[in-house]
Structure formats: C-alpha cells, structure tokens
Image (cartoon, rainbow, N blue to C red):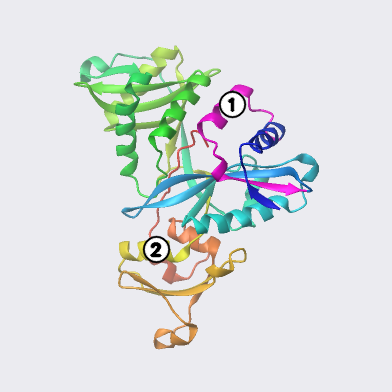
C-alpha cells in the first residue's frame, strides 16, 4: 500500500534515509528535514504495515520558452536493503507519476547518485537532460583586480539574503529551461554552505550586487558550485579573490553547458503531461509542422496523437490525420529529449527542426 506521510510516519522516512544514505551526517539530515521535507510531498510504501520505501516530490518552477511550468524533483528515493530488488521503487515511482499529474506537474526531474541508477531510471523513461562542464584553473600570480574595476568582494551574511536572492533569481530567470529556486530554497542553500564550511561571495559596485559565487574549500582545491555575474570581468575578479581568501591557487569550477565544451550529464527528466509542454513549445516555434504519436508505458493516458502546426498543438483522432499523413512514433523519453533540446540518435530529418538547448539545474541541495 502507498500512502502520504504524516507526522507519525515522518520518523520512518527519516529512518529509511539514515539507513540508505549512511554518508549523510546527522547534522545534514536534521537540516534537510527542517528545511526541505514536507509530509504532503512524501510518499511511503507500506508492506504489512511497515514503511519499507519512500520518496519525496519537491516542487520547483522551470522556465520553459517564456513561461514558468511546475516541476517536481524526486528526492530521497530509497528502499530498505532487505526489501530491495523486488520492484517496490518502480511501483512507488509510477504511483508518484500519477500523483504529480493530478497536481498538474508537467515534468519530473532527479539526480541519480550512482551510475547504475541511471539505467534504472531510464527504464521508467527518464532521460539525461542536464549537462554541465568543469573547468580547472590555477592562479599563480595574483593581483588585486578589484581596485581597477571599483568592485568590492565580501561574504554574504544573513542580513543580505533578500537582496542576494533578488539578484540570484533575476539572473536565473533569464535562462531558458532553468529550474528556479524560491527564497526559501535560497535560504536553505545558504544554511547548507555554512554546514559545509563554504562561503557565498558577493561582488558589489556602487552598493549594487553584480555577482554571486558559491565556493567551498575541498582539500587542495576550491570547488565553485555556481557563479552568476553580470559580465566576464566580475568572473575574473571572483576567481582571483577567492584564491586569496582560501590561500589556494587551484580551482574546480562547475559551469552550465554550451555547445563547445566537454560535457557530463548529471540530472535526468521525464515528461508527465505531454500536451501542456507541446503547446508551449509549438507557440515558441511556429515554424514546426509535424504529427507525433506519443507512447508511455507507465502512464496510459499519455498515449495520444498530436498535430503541431503554425504555433498550435492539437490532439487528433488517428482517422483525422491531415492529407493522410502518418504520425512519427515517439515514446515519452524521446519526447522529453526533443523538447529539452537533446537530438535523437539516428533521428529522422524532420526532427532537426527542434531547437538544440541546454537545460540547467543547480546542483546545490539536490
């Protein structure tokens, strides 16, 4: 039986988390359950009255071609060791798909923590969707570039959270296909950096924020988790100043993907409501004309034919196809790849009219 958590069963969810993720400290787990956990977003699998598996559906907005769509991030998906390999998590996830559809959530995302989990989630029609690059840098001869650019670098404190968030959300809202964070999420990121002995650096010009840099010292290098700047000069200033702050010249920087870098995939995505995203995509790409037949083995309601033409998307009967055209067959995983900007392998020429893109999801808190 699958049920939503309540205040009584919350302790069972915490027990499953501690059992399945032993590398997480008690301090982090307490932080997570205070800052992120909610009963109404948590599903529990009961076997003979015992909680043996659980997952959470954390809500986030995502920019999608000029609109904000609701998404849900799958967090804390875990099954007690003695109940693994029995299909329990698959059943729990499929149940979650239907629950998310009821909430009109168009897209589900997650980040597998092990490589073998990628194959597991692919069987449930998730596909790699969030690419990143890493840049290794060394600064041997440092100089104080801030003096030449009238820029002040400082460390964010709790008093500046609202102003910092306004800059953070403004910069991310400019990105297409970007998972957005609420002010509550931003405060949680700030707290998590404090737990990890990291810092959020801010760049100020004339008392106005021009950049944020999320950095942690890890052994012999500085790990930059995210950097948002108004221009490239601010980026250079950050890189120089944090090496001075940490007295460390080696930097490993995670960056959003682009078409000219060596990429690695981290996050995955799965469409839950095809027509909503197809309509938004069609409106943003009025040149596309195609008929597709969607298949989804886990959500029967998603089996449908759609005609995309002149900025509109129509659900159509197979007997009403225009000019006797045959639809192109797509499973839900292939559709997710197309709409999020991934090319299909050995795809028909007609699919090349879909736009190449690089969705972005911050790896902090996930």
Task: Pick out the residue farthest to the left.
Answer: 206
Q: Where is residue 148 in the image (x, y as percent from the top left)?
A: 21, 17
Which label is found at residue 354? 2
The answer to whether the residues at label 2 and label 1 have Cβ atoms under 8 Å apart is no
Based on the picture, tell me whether residue 225 belongs to the magenta stretch: no
**Residue shown at the point (62%, 66%) measured from the top left:** 297
Q: Name the residue under label 1.
A: 30
Q: 25 or 309, which is in the foreground? A: 25
Pointer 1 local density, CA inside 10 Å: few below 14, some 14–19, many at least 20? few
Decide which of tag 2 and tag 1 comes sooner along the chain: 1
Q: Position of residue 17 (x, y in %)?
A: 66, 35
Horizontal and vertical percent position of residue 213: 38, 26
Q: Residue 11 carries which label?
A: none
**98 versus 187 height, above or below:** below
**Residue drawn where x is 32% and y is 43% of the image:** 173
In the image, is residue 99 above or below residue 327? above
From the viewer's perspective, tell me whether residue 18 is left or right of residue 353: right
Distance, label 2 to label 1, CA atoms, is 44 Å
Observer-nearest residue: 133 or 295? Answer: 295
Q: Which residue is drawn at 65% across and 49% down?
A: 3
């Amino acid at each position: 039986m699958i049920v939503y958590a309540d205040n009584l069963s919350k302790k069972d969810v915490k027990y499953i988390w501690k059992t399945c993720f032993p590398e997480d400290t008690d301090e982090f787990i307490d932080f997570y359950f205070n800052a992120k956990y909610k009963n109404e977003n948590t599903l529990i699998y009961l076997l003979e009255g015992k909680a043996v598996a659980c997952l959470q559906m954390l809500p986030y907005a995502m920019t999608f071609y000029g609109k904000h769509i609701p998404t849900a991030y799958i967090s804390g998906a875990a099954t007690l060791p003695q109940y693994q390999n029995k299909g329990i998590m698959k059943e729990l996830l499929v149940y979650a798909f239907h629950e998310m559809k009821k909430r009109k959530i168009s897209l589900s995302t997650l980040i597998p923590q092990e490589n073998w989990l990628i194959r597991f989630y692919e069987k449930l029609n998730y596909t790699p969707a969030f690419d990143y690059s890493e840049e290794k840098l060394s600064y041997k001869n440092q100089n104080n570039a801030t003096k030449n650019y009238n820029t002040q670098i400082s460390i964010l404190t709790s008093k500046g959270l609202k102003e910092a968030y306004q800059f953070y959300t403004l910069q991310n809202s400019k990105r297409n296909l970007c998972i957005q964070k609420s002010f509550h999420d931003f405060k949680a990121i700030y707290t998590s950096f404090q737990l990890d002995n990291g810092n959020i650096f801010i760049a100020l010009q004339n008392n106005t924020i021009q950049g944020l840099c999320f950095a942690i010292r890890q052994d012999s290098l500085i790990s930059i988790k995210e950097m948002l700047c108004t221009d490239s000069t601010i980026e250079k200033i950050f890189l120089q100043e944090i090496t001075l702050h940490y007295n460390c010249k080696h930097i490993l920087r995670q960056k959003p993907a682009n078409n000219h870098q060596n990429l690695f995939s981290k996050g995955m995505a799965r469409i839950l409501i095809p027509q909503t995203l197809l309509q938004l995509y069609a409106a943003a790409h009025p040149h596309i004309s195609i008929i597709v037949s969607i298949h989804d083995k886990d959500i029967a309601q998603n089996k449908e034919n759609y005609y995309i033409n002149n900025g509109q998307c129509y659900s159509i009967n197979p007997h009403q196809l225009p000019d006797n055209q045959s639809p192109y067959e797509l499973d839900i995983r292939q559709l997710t790849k197309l709409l999020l900007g991934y090319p299909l392998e050995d795809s028909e020429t007609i699919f090349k009219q879909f736009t190449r893109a690089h969705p972005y999801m911050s790896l902090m808190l996930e």
